[in-house]
Image (cartoon, rainbow, N blue to C red):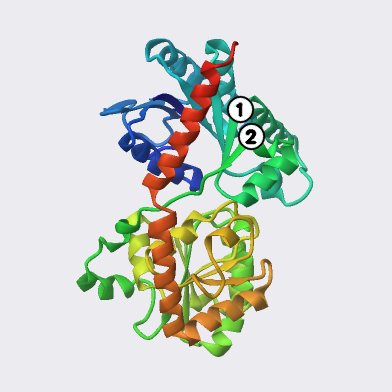
């Protein structure tokens, strides 16, 4: 199987769940025998051309122009991606195009029609879902239309959760029998890399020895519900004064959260770390008494899966795909979204009953191993590839 894959993110440029997904699914697909030619913008360095066995990565200089809005910039970058991918399609006998989200869809759709290749689309999130209301700007409406067009042009659509499949059907009118639900995964072994003897010194950077770390990892934006977490902090401290909240990540909401923490008198109990490398993230997971993900919108929740893989007790909101990842009282605690009282209850319940929390964490780890490993996910994705290529071979174009 020879696949052209297009993605806006790929290491070393990984911003969110899309980039993590592509970074992990590609080597797993290669291990299943797929030859992958991956085309991505060269946002953060990396070799322009990189070949490792059956994987070839083409990082294209995006050459963004000043004065353009985000949507217009994306269209211009797609033209450069398309030029590189055009040569690949001609040279490598590509059988299928796999495109991730709308950001690279303009190139993918053009190549589909020019070379009469079937297009598979993975939808990681939607603009309407992120907005959680009317689309107020022309850029948002343009993105929404691009997402609809991608689902329309795709031979099949992959979503990471049943929740996201519902969004795609509701927002874009995509037929249910055109959608395959394949979850995200996680590499469970990566969280055992740091030696125990280093943890006490490492821990002191974030909390006192007597403090229980309540950890959030992810982007600091409104859809992730950090504003709800800050409001819940005084309610947690009233029952657990030794709790220390560590918020690991960056985003535009950070100054607002810091100001609100000061207003509530809890600034000293919340450590906003900013960006942290993966090694520090993994170390924090190993030290945390609880990991909390209070999202308002969450297509899947890969960071919650990482916490589960690290055997950290999780508290998550019943938002989007998170409710498909975490089972209440079995693999974690689920709470009402956008509700500080409910969130505080979940955190307090976890901190007050550490034995129960550890049992839930162990249950969650076993679920990660059996249901969310990348080779299983790669085999499911390959099955979709094979179906699409077979159907294309029986179709005149």
Nearer to us: label 1 or label 2: 2
Across the whole image, how many numbered discs are drawn on residues? 2
Mark with earlier residue (1, 2): 1
Q: Quadrant of residue 154?
A: top right
Quarter of the image with the C terminus is top right
Circle 2: is it few (<14), some (14-19), or many (20+) Cα within 10 Å? some
Percent x, y of residue 214: 47, 74
Q: What's the CA distance linking mark 1 and mark 2? A: 9 Å
Mark 1 element type: loop
Report x, y in % for residue 363.
43, 70
The answer to whether the residue labelled 1 contacts the one labelled 2, judged by CB atoms less than 8 Å apart, is yes
Tell me what residue is drawn at x 72 percent, y 36 percent: 172
Residue at x-position 55% and y-position 22%: 391
Q: Quadrant of the N terminus?
A: top left
In this figure, which residue is indicated by the disc labeled 1?
Answer: 154
Whether residue 163 is visible here, answered yes or no, is yes
Q: Mark 2 sits on what residue?
A: 178
């Amino acid at each position: 199987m020879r696949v052209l894959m297009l993605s806006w993110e790929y290491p070393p440029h990984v911003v969110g769940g899309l980039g993590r997904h592509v970074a992990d699914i590609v080597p797993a697909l290669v291990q299943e025998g797929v030859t992958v030619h991956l085309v991505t913008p060269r946002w953060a360095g990396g070799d322009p051309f990189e070949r490792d066995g059956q994987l070839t990565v083409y990082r294209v200089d995006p050459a963004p122009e000043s004065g353009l809005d985000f949507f217009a910039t994306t269209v211009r970058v797609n033209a450069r991606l398309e030029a590189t991918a055009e040569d690949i399609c001609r040279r490598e006998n590509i059988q299928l195009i796999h495109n991730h989200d709308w950001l690279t869809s303009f190139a993918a759709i053009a190549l589909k029609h020019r070379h009469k290749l079937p297009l598979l689309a993975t939808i990681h999130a939607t603009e309407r879902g992120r907005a959680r209301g009317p689309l107020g700007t022309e850029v948002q409406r343009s993105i929404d239309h691009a997402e609809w067009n991608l689902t329309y042009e795709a031979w099949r659509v992959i979503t990471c959760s049943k929740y996201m499949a519902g969004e795609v059907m509701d927002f874009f009118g995509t037929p249910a029998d055109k959608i395959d639900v394949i979850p995200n995964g996680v590499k469970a072994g990566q969280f055992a890399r740091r030696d125990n003897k280093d943890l006490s010194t490492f821990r002191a950077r974030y909390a006192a020895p007597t403090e229980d770390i309540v950890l959030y990892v992810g982007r600091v934006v409104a859809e992730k519900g950090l504003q709800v977490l800050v409001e819940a902090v005084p309610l947690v401290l009233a029952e657990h004064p030794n709790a220390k909240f560590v918020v690991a990540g960056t985003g535009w909401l950070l100054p607002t959260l810091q100001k609100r923490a000061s207003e509530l008198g809890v600034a000293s109990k919340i450590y906003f770390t900013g960006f942290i490398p993966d090694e520090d993230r993994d170390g924090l997971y190993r030290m945390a008494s609880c990991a909390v993900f209070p999202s308002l919108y969450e297509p899947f929740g890969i960071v919650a899966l990482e916490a589960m893989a690290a055997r950290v007790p999780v508290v998550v909101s019943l938002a989007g795909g998170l409710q498909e990842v975490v089972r209440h009282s079995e693999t974690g605690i689920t709470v009402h979204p956008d509700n500080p009282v409910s969130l505080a209850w979940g955190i307090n319940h976890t901190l007050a009953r550490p034995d129960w929390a550890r049992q839930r964490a162990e249950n969650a780890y076993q679920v990660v191993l059996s249901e969310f490993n990348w080779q299983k996910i790669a085999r499911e994705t390959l099955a979709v590839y094979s179906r699409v290529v077979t159907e294309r071979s029986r179709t005149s174009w």
